[in-house]
Image (cartoon, coloured by chain):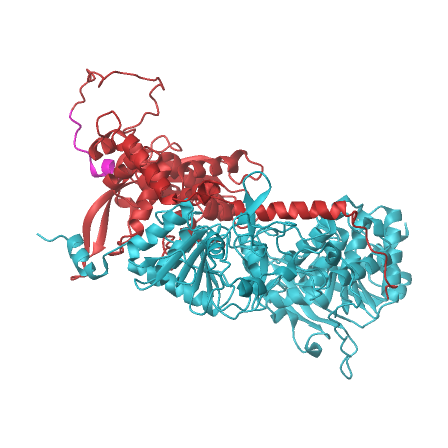
Amino acid sequence: MGYSGARGGLEAILAAEDLVRRARDHAPAPWAPTEQITARFRLAVDRVLGEAGLYHEDTSAAALRQAEGDPLEAAHLVRAHRSTLPRLAVSEPVDPDEMVVLRRIVPAFREPDGPQLLGRTTDYTGRLLEQPAGPPPRQSRTPATPPDRTETQRRPGRFLDLLRKLDLVVDHRRADDPEPFDITRKPARPPAERSAALASMARAETGALVALWYRSILGPDGDIHEVTLGEVRHGRLPLRVRHPHTGNPVRVGEFRVTEAEAIEDLDGADEDRSRFDVGYGLCFGHNERKAIAMANLDVANRRFGRTGPLEQLLLLTTDGLDSAGFLEHLKLPHYVTFRSMVERKQAMRAAGEADEGPRVAEPAGQECR
Amino acid sequence: MTSTLDTLLTEREAELPAGILDEGAKREIRRATLTAVCVPGYQVPFGSREMPVARGWGSGGLQVTLGVIGAADTVKVIDQGDDAGVNATNLRRMIAGTTGCADTADTREATIVQTRHRVPEERLRDGQVLVLQVPVPEPLRGVEKSVIECARMHAEGDYSAMWVSLYEDLVRNGMITRTTGYPVLVGGRYVLATTPIPRWDVPRLHESDHLSLFGAGREKRIYAIPPHTDVRPLTFDDVPFEVEYAPGARCVLCGSDDVFLVEAGTTGAYACSDTEWCARVREGDADIQAHHERAPLHLLPDPAARLRAPATTTARPERPRPALPEGQDWALRVDGLGKVFGPGAADAVPGTGPDHGTAISPATGAIVAAWDVSFDVAPGEALGVIGESGSGKSTVLGCVIGDEQATAGHVRLAALDEGRTDLLTLPGDARRRLRVDSMAVVHQNSAAGLDLRVTAGGNIAERLTAAGWRGYHDIRRRAAELLDRVEVPLSRMDDPVRTFSGGMRQRVQIAKALATEPPVLLLDEPTTGLDASVAAGVLDLLRGLLAERDIAAVVVSHDFAVIEALTDRTLVMQLGRVVERGLTDQLFHDPHHPYTQRLVAAARR
């Protein structure tokens, strides 16, 4: 009998847990404190808090440490942790125009409203592996104290607003202001509103979303055609909740997000071919790949989500916990189901040996009227 | 100083404590569970939370259990029927550890049994709750990948695709080869996936004393089978449902042969999958007699019974053709039908039509595809609608069928409510049902009317099962009759339609359309795209079929030869309007409207 038939399943589990704890928590290396993880593995921390849908760097870092660096496992730990927490309040709507940018790129325009701000990026650094034994010496180039930024530099105008001023964008803004779909409280299934797809993408596994984006470009059923990135930014936004006693919005903190706007050429028969459409992406932390993929897929979903498989793919196949959990459940014992499958194979074979032969169509029983 | 967050936290402190699921989430789960009990077999969506176990590892079952359990409960957890497996052990310590409830391996002591892949051999009693972990809650996924379409099928109780898959299984394999998670019909309404429990356990859900709750965490669905609910495995009336069987197998430990057995070791031995039952049999602590009487031994496979034609045919749903009401001689009647693509309705119409030489509205820019089209057809009569492409004839047919949403007009069927109801006011599901047995369509493109992956017989079975046929042999016989009549060789009956030629596909489509003997038949360019000689054969067939039936037919074509061969009366359409109508013979010999004259001249060339 297999392992699950063995008596003492509990002993086996405890032994496995002990093995993990000894090797992980007492590895022959200095302990990695939470602040070290948040400071040195910033992008991994951001990825986890985005995929977990819980913005808290220290929680994310602790999860990464416990998960031995596996971002998906870390996101699972954070989400399961969040399931234990009550919902204290619902934040006020966030206005992304309030963002104080740390980085902001407008590829589609040479001199946009406000600065092109490269910020902290390795985009233009040669991908050369460095293997220093310790911290590399400080750069000789000491940065000059940056001058105080102007308000436009801190909160630059939005490229989309420029396009709107030029009347080059199809306007999808609606007069009513529906509550966004809360994917943590209701399952999002097609047909779903746009906010459900956006929320699903914001929390999606980054690799899954990028793969779906690339499939839409190079795959057999692609829905993204003319790819131009309008704008991508990384910055800080304030978070406000209403005070339980006064009812006034109160700022309780700030969080970093990556935001992207993607421009799509319109060429459909029933589309306004004299204008562009713009897709939107926003996710927790610094994760440009995800935000850009999301913005492109948002507009593709608006155009082709229902006529093809895209909406179902976005809503149901990009969550990392869902896909990875289902994949990993294959490791659970399946000998009951497999026995049932074997039985049908044997029954088929027995029927064949009994020379029932292949089925032939019965002759017509009676004249068709 | 107290921050806003501190204040919020204090105010909610009463709800805080803990476990692995907050109290708000448990309330949501209980609400979904109650809904599920009220609508047996219906998959209730719920805001599935992330659990300390991964999706697919029982996160749905765990949420259901945590939602309904209390400290006074006693829980038993099994995986594959085994209490001691690692997964069962893990879930049990999690449940008992966070709720303070007792745990047991003895089914008789448990108030809640959470399980994966099995129902215990011990009889579950009134008051006990069985919580099943569900990896894939959608029973239709195997036949339909679109979740929107699956939802529609459940809403309308339209399970013919499922029946076709069982039919095709029988045709290809001589038996139903579905293994675990066998689909069942619950309370005569919803088809439900029995999670992957073996077929052996399926009868235990029927008219049970206990409550079964199904939790699918990844797909965020809860469903239920309340006590004393009718649960029937889907199978044809004359094909028995079969449980698992290994000839001569007995448990090497307890000797039982009336239990679900799994392989033990690699030498061909078997053992009970339910380890608790096995141990109790050995200890003499089990009511073996009662268990034996409940065991599904009458469902053991019997190859002889499998496809044996029944001596008597099962009742097929015969629908008497209603007599036409007094003073009414039509089977189908269309009044003032109009279709405008684009902005505007009646206000888009002025300035369009043959008199103006355009279908594009000068007022709104919309395309007036058809306007003010009226006709009726009597039983035994065939009406032709002819015109060039763009004349609106196919739009009219689309509006009658329900593929297009008409802008104006009325469509009535004598078979529906004696012609009093306007089809255009009916919702989509009602119109779809009418297409099953009241108004059949033969499309120009056979892929629109047939599933090309399915056999010729299976395509006809789709229509028959939709109409309520449940006898496998009856369906085979009827399909064979029909295929014989449309001159498809019976040797091709069990071949997928994609292997058929164009003419042969049209014949299968015609056979399918006639399967339920509908009073109205709509033919949209039935021979267009076929070689001339093939088309002639199909036309001959159609002429014969119409002549021997009391059916009202509408034939849409651009080809006068088709109209002349099949129809008694004809409408001529141009730019969305009827420009001439009359007896087909007269129209052909003495066309009045210049447009008709052009069509006739073209046909004579």
Residue at image point 34% right, 17% down: A129
Q: Image quarter for residue A243?
A: bottom left
Q: Is residue B326 magenta?
A: no
Residue at image point 71% right, 65% down: B469
Q: Is residue B360 left or right of residue A318?
A: right
Q: Image quarter for residue B337?
A: bottom right
Residue at image point 31% right, 52% down: A83
Give the residue furthest to the bottom. B326
Residue B425 spot, x, y in % from top left = 61, 71
Q: Is residue B127 left or right of residue B533?
A: left
SS majority, magenta: loop
Question: Looking at the colours in the rendered structure, which chain would you say is drawn in red?
Answer: A
- The answer, for residue A345, to whether it is visible in the render is yes
Give the residue furthest to the left. B1
Q: Is residue B418 above or below residue A51?
A: below
- The answer, for residue B353, to whether it is visible in the render is no
Residue B510 spot, x, y in % from top left = 79, 58
Q: Which residues are magenta?
A: A145-156
